[in-house]
Amino acid sequence: MSRAFPSRPARCATAALLSTMAVGGCASDQADGGAESRGLDQATLGRGAPVTAFVGVNVVPMDAERVLEDQTVLVVDGTIAVIGPRASVDVPSTAVTISGENRWLVPGLGEMHAHVGGSDEAVARTLFLYLSQGITTARGMLGQPQHLEIRARLASGDLLGPRLYTSGPSLNGPSIPDADSARQAVRHQAELGYDFMKIHPGLSRQEYDAIAQTGREAGLDWAGHVPVDVGLARALEVQQSSIDHLDQYMEAIVVPGTDVSQSLFFGLNLAGSVDEAKIAEVARATAEAGVWNVPTQSLIENMASSATGEEMAAQPSMRYMPPQQLAAWTNQKDEFLQSPAYSPEAAARAVAVRRQLIKALHDAGAGLLLGSDAPQVFQVPGFSIQHELELMVASGLTPYEALRAGTYNVAEYFEASDEFGTIEEGKAADFVLVDGNPLSDIANMARRSGVMVAGRWLSAADIASRLEEIASSH
């Protein structure tokens, strides 16, 4: 996986991907278009491949902060075949046509701190919930052996849902008793074909270092939490591929002498001891190390708020979660509010500091990735990613910068920017079609007319019908 995040133009599609299609260069060459008519060649038409046409749509390619207005996008075999001005693109008579009038086509989003579930029913429900809200790529952060099969079924189209990158089972204090066990676990996960390793709390410095060294030897990255015995400085030094939840950042920016041994939920109770001058320092160090961050700010703000569990369980999106799950979340939230270490004032201060950290990381050039840790406490899969986008903007990012964390940056992180992440000819047809310009208002990402994943179109009506089935099944 990539540990660098250069600002460079998105790449043209390879000639091999487009050998049967009439093409006109990269998306950057298509902004103004031309009068010459373009379309699919006879070889493509002759083999009868299904074609989907988005006609008259405003394309938000996400290779730069711009909109290509009144375009037609042709999709064949799950791939973007042609992009061009509506007047210059020939739409085959057999194409399934989707009106793009007064709509914006955006690359599908990534949920970079996802959980997939265990039972077949839970997996199918969770994957659809992600997809229903425009998530076409998910990074599973608590892998299980069956997730390898799920990943393959998603890739083949046998199972409906986002493309999946999955960790192996958690590496944590109880599962890793010593450094030798750490090395053995890393090699085993690499042999089985997991995409990366998930780090949880409880690891000693020696065990963590063994994971880092062996992971580097095996070509397997590690991501997630930063154990207390390791600390932020060491995680940056060995280049953990991503740090999630801004774990150990709060502990790293408090004044000397602060007791961090009783840190509560990613340092929510330490905000009163923060030295704000250190925020820019840790942001700069993160950028220099090439370490990405998945803030999961919506998870933290859900927990930090003074709203009771019952109040949060009344949110409309909660109807898609099983009642027993909601009951567990309600109890967890109420117990947190009743903790002696919790105070609304300290929590509000911590939220403000975390938002400063997010903006400082962005300004320093450190990579940010969109993720919300769903399904966790009141984080309904898919729905929580809209909240995460809004909180990124509330932290000082522009709508474009927030969207980039969930599109272009996701592909860069996986070293797959020639496959997805922007809307360009030759890339995967993963789209969200929305009824307002998201670069003007990030809330428009929730105004969906439909979602396409790997060329499969789900209309707003299709999505609403399946969501109602999910809600009614509890």
Image (tube, rainbow, N blue to C red):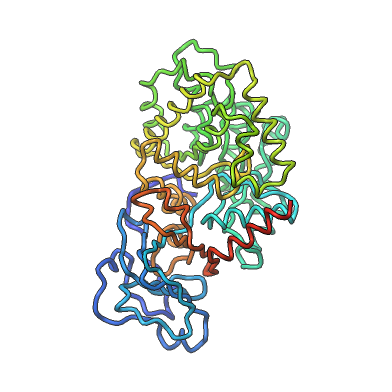
- Residue 414 at what x, y percent from top left? 49, 52
Is residue 360 visible in the rendered image? The answer is yes
- Residue 241 at what x, y percent from top left? 51, 41
Most foreground residue, 35 or 412 = 35
Residue drawn 50% across and 43% down? 387
- Residue 267 at what x, y percent from top left? 54, 23
Q: Quadrant of residue 202?
A: top right
Most foreground residue, 81 or 221 = 81
Most foreground residue, 215 or 388 = 388
- Residue 349 at what x, y percent from top left? 46, 22
Most foreground residue, 389 or 330 = 330
Is residue 16 visible in the rendered image? The answer is no
Q: Is residue 380 left or right of residue 473?
A: left
Above or below for 55 versus 389: below
Above or below for 67 versus 223: below
Residue drawn 48% across and 85% down? 94
Q: Quadrant of residue 107?
A: bottom left
Above or below for 139 versus 108: above
Residue drawn 44% across and 86% down? 93
Q: Is residue 32 left or right of residue 44?
A: left
